[in-house]
Amino acid sequence: MDDIDEAVYPATINEDLVDYGHVPDDVDDAGGADAAAFLGLGNVTEAAAAPVPPVSESQSCGSKRRSPVWDNFDEILDDKRVHIAAVCKFCRHRLSAKSAAGTGHLLRHQNACKKKADHAKMVQTRLAMNPDGSYRNWEYKPDVARVELCKLIARLDLPLSVADNDAWDDYIQRAHNPRHVRVSRFSTSRDLEKLFIDTINNLKHIVFSGVNSICLTSDIWSGNAKEDYITVVAHFINSDWQLKKHVIGFRLIEEAHTGTNIAERISDVVEAFGMTDKIFTVSLDNASSNNNAMQILAPIFSGYLGVDPDPDNPSKKTYYVVHQRCACHVINLIVKSGLKRLKPYIEIFRTAISYLNASNKRIAEFKDYCLLKGVRPRKFGLDMDVRWNSTYLMLKHLIPYKNIFSVFINGNIGYAALNGEHWYVAEKVCEFLECFMNQLLLYLECIIPQVLWFCII
């Protein structure tokens, strides 16, 4: 029972002083006999005359501790054998240990350090290491190494032959694992295909099996090889109430971007994952071909929200599926229409940036000029015609350097290519585009919670 009381009720200042052989604060004015009686030293007369033996450090650290938290801390005492600090045995962090501060902060620090220690142990277990940093018996598994190599190639977009050379073998065998076996690019290609199939099966049978409502997004884009691809992304909320997304379709579309071809690709991807009756919304851009695609997809994806037949004409039905037009695409069309009127002014800045970036010598000279003026140098990139926000970012980064940039460009060209009027228009255009940027962010803040709520219900 005493141990329970000591663990529950923290020690007071007076109790600590008593433990270390000192007179409590509230009996400082008492005589020796009274103090001895208070300390419980037996015979008052003998106790008053007998000197109090000094307390050794081992006794002070190992005797009557009031809280088990001290098992994880090293105590630091002052000249009067009173706690002044505590050092954590896990992280060696120094904390206050005065009695007036209590032990609550020590307990909180102990819990945090234990979590870190548990995580470190888990990492050490995965790395097959002992707590002291030494290696224990560990079995090299070539199949695991090949899977991890495929993940590395996929994450960093590395060539398949990255591990099929002597340099890779020397690095792995000398620095990590002397039992490493080289994997050819042909084996890596087969391993990547197997990993892809396993990932698809995991999405089908594990990830999406417990999901009831899914939102789709899709878009078409062109690669560096001038080939068009259509992507399909599934957004959902898992059982832990976390918003997740997975790319479930990445298909080459060689035909014309008609509504029929787009609908065929999207429906094939959704049917392959068995989620035809789970589609709540489909987000596409505002192109007319996507509107035609939604007319084809509506009867296919109507299993989640249902069908409403016309009472006057039973053969006519209304298929419910939410077609969400991409807000970014709609705003892009609006802004691009306005930027056409301002193209001559913006084109001047594009020409100036292209002139600067066309020569490495000019870039180095501009950097030296910025340093000479006490300004941090930077590079300026051109905007993209299909992304209005890139025009906003181009002007936003360029305007703070208007004085230095104008002097440098005009001095190299030989005439006043940029003047105050150009920068005035650039500032107004930047303010104009900033309004749409803020509206876009506001729209996303409003629409995303609504979509999530509908996905939940």
Image (cartoon, helix red, strand yellow):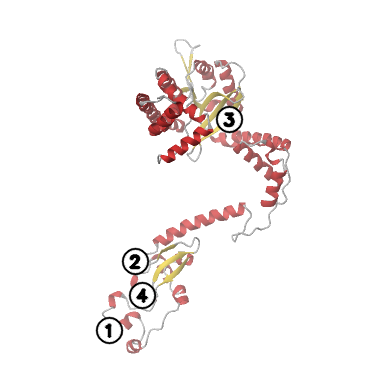
| Residue at the disc numbered 3 | 248
Q: Position of residue 108 (x, y in %)?
A: 43, 58
Which residue is the site of mark 1? 31
Mark 3: amino acid? Ile
How far, Cα to Cα, is label 3 from label 2?
A: 60 Å
- Relative to 144, is 43 on the left or the right? left
Residue that appears at 71% across and 35% down: 190
Residue type at the position of mark 4: Leu
Compute the Cα span from label 3 to label 4: 69 Å
- The amino acid at mark 1 is Gly
Amino acid type, callout 2 = Ala
Q: Quadrant of the C terminus?
A: top left
Q: Residue at x 40, y 39 (%)?
A: 373
The picture places residue 212, in percent across and down from the top left corner, at 51, 32
Q: Relative to 161, say whether 426 is above or below.
A: above
Secondary structure of residue under mark 3: strand
As drawn, the label of residue 17 is 4
* Mark before the other along the chain sequence, 2 or 4: 4
Residue 156, quarter of picture: top right
Can residue 105 be seen?
yes
The disc, 3 or 4, on the residue closer to the chain's N-terminal end is 4
Q: Quick check: can you spot residue 457? A: no
Crowd around label 3: few <14 · some 14–19 · many ≥20 (10 Å):
some
The residue labelled by disc 2 is: 100
